[in-house]
Each structure stands twice: as structure tokens, then as C-alpha cells.
Image (spheres, rainbow, N blue to C red):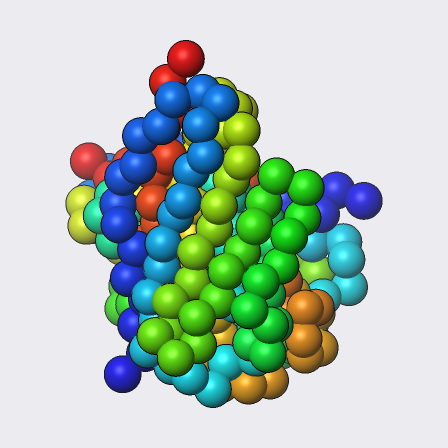
Amino acid sequence: NAGVTQTPKFRVLKTGQSMTLLCAQDMNHEYMYWYRQDPGMGLRLIHYSVGEGTTAKGEVPDGYNVSRLKKQNFLLGLESAAPSQTSVYFCASSLLAEGQDNEQFFGPGTRLTVL
Amino acid sequence: GEDVEQSLFLSVREGDSSVINCTYTDSSSTYLYWYKQEPGAGLQLLTYIFSNMDMKQDQRLTVLLNKKDKHLSLRIADTQTGDSAIYFCAYPPCAGNNRKLIWGLGTSLAVNP
């Protein structure tokens, strides 16, 4: 199993450009999440999904859109990138279960720079 | 509200013990987690503890939970350079709710030879 994969690994955008970050998981997980990680800010939840065809807002959803058309994929879109969106983006997934199976599995991250 | 506090930095010598502390506000959580993030990588679950336990030991790792004080600690015995990483404390805010985790800011552990 590859686990959680993210593409691309690195990207540089100019202000106003758009892009889509792809997250894929092969563990048949129901839940998927998009986080951003910034120095001194920890992990902040952008959007999440509790199953195929569903999405919900997290703590910092503004400027981002998501789609979960297939269970294994969770896409994060930036329609008009801004320098404030320079960050490292992490995708994670987890089972639909309680207890220790709440573990979230993380991808390796995408480092995005917006100039 | 829901919050997790951790000290941001810890520096230890190789071979010493490291203790990373975390305080939280929500008392209804059933599990508390420690995640590890190595440089340039994503987070991985390191260990967890049930809220009805006081201590959990797993090889070099010892997790202590003081529910009264809402304090969680992670002790790493015989700390190695490979333990250099950021350690995050996290918990689900409501029992059975896996829609999100409340994360601390992370403690950056530096291990000096």
C-alpha cells in the first residue's frame, strides 16, 4: 500500500494563478482532511470530507475549495492564489471508526510558494 | 473552548531523557495522541493513551496522563539523534467525533550529540 500520496511535492505560483493539489489514499478510508502548516501556527484544518461526495469547512476555509468525487481522492483548489497561502499543505485520511482507529494517516506534504 | 498548549522548543543531549508536556482543556476526550513529524515529512502517530489510563509504556516511550490537571506528557528515554523532530499533542474534542482533532502547536525537539 502506498498510503496517502500528494501531488505535486513543490509548486511556485504567481499571485492570482490557480492550481489543484491532489491527495490519494489506497486504504479505503472514509474521512479525508486538508491541513496547512505554518511556522508558529501548528496544523490548521482547511476542509474535510466524511465520505465520497461530501465536503465540509474546517478552521480556515477561505480561498480554498475542495471536491471528493471518488472515495480515494480529495482535491484542494486555489482559484486565485495569494501570498498568504504560501504554506506546506498536508492531506490526511482516517477510518470511519472510534477509538484508536481514529488515527489520521498523513501524506508527505506539498510545499507551495505564492509570489 | 478547545485548546492544547505545548512548549515550542526542547533541547537535550544524546542519551538523556526528554520530556515533552502538553495541557488541554476538553475533558470529554476518550483518547489523546502523540504524533511525530520528522524534518520534511508528514506526521505519523507515535503513541496514544486512553483517557481512563494514567500511564502507558512502549519501549523507550512513556506517556503520563493527569486527568485532574489535564496534563499529558511524553517521555523519551535514552534520546537519540533520530528522535529529533516536532512532536504534536492532539485529541478529538468530543468522544467518538473523528471529524477533527485539536492540535497543539508542536514541540521541536533538538538532540545534541
Residue A65 visible in the displayed image: no
Which residue: 49% across, 22% down?
B15
Q: Is residue B112 above or below residue A4?
A: above
Q: Is residue A17 left or right of residue A34?
A: left
The picture places residue A11, in percent across and down from the top left corner, at: 39, 34
Q: Is residue B94 left or right of residue A6?
A: left
Question: Quick one: quadrant of the C terminus of chain A?
Answer: top left
- Nearer to the camera, A36 or B62: B62
Question: Quick one: quadrant of the N terminus of chain A?
Answer: top right
The picture places residue B92, in percent across and down from the top left corner, at: 49, 75
Going by the picture, which residue comes out furthest to the top? Answer: B113
The picture places residue A113, in percent across and down from the top left corner, at: 29, 36
- Nearer to the camera, A12 or A107: A107
Q: Is residue A108 above or below residue A42?
A: above
The picture places residue B110, in percent across and down from the top left corner, at: 36, 28
Which residue: 48% across, 45% down?
B75
Q: Is residue B32 left or right of residue A2?
A: left
